[in-house]
Image (cartoon, grey):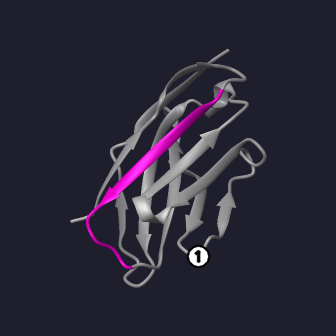
């Protein structure tokens, strides 16, 4: 059973930085995509950034130039470095992994990020 555990959320002032981490336990196909999504109150969950096991990355336009996703495959961990945070970045951030063979996806429980103005 695949399990994802996020950490690193918290309260930060606008302009500040946070780094989120997500550790995977359990087996999954070596070709996979790990990513971060977020959901603000009253809004739909949206993609923030993804990183494939091959090294490709993708970002939402709203975070380009401010957020950086990275993976440490040896540690089964994906990170999200968030700089120049804005109040509109406030949301619950979820980690996801998608198996590139079966397309099955797994989600973490989420971590709250709150940016004060």
Viewer-nearest residue: 99 or 81: 81
Where residue 69 appears, as percent x and y from the top left, is: 61, 53
Viewer-nearest residue: 30 or 48: 30
Q: Secondary structure at mark 1?
A: loop
Classify 55 as above or below 43: below
- Residue at the far right: name it: 65
Stretch of the chain drawn in magenta: 17-29
Query: What residue appears at the point 33 percent right and 74 percent down from the top-left corner?
Result: 28
Q: The N terminus appears in which quarter of the rendering?
A: bottom left
Q: Is residue 95 magenta?
A: no
Where residue 61 appears, as percent x and y from the top left, is: 75, 51
Left or right relative to 40: residue 95:
left
Viewer-nearest residue: 19 or 61: 19
- Residue at the far front: name it: 74
Viewer-nearest residue: 103 or 66: 66
Query: What residue appears at the point 67 percent right and 24 percent down from the top-left corner?
Result: 16
């Amino acid at each position: 059973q695949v399990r994802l555990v996020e950490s690193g959320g918290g309260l930060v002032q606008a302009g500040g930085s946070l780094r989120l981490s997500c550790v995977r336990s359990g087996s999954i196909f070596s070709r996979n995509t790990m990513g971060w999504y977020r959901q603000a109150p009253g809004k739909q969950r949206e993609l923030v950034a993804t990183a494939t096991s091959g090294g490709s990355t993708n970002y939402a336009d709203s975070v380009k130039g401010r957020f950086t996703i990275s993976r440490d495959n040896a540690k089964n961990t994906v990170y999200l470095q968030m700089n120049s945070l804005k109040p509109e970045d406030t949301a619950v951030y979820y980690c996801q992994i998608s198996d590139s063979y079966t397309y099955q996806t797994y989600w973490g429980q989420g971590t709250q990020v709150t940016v004060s103005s």
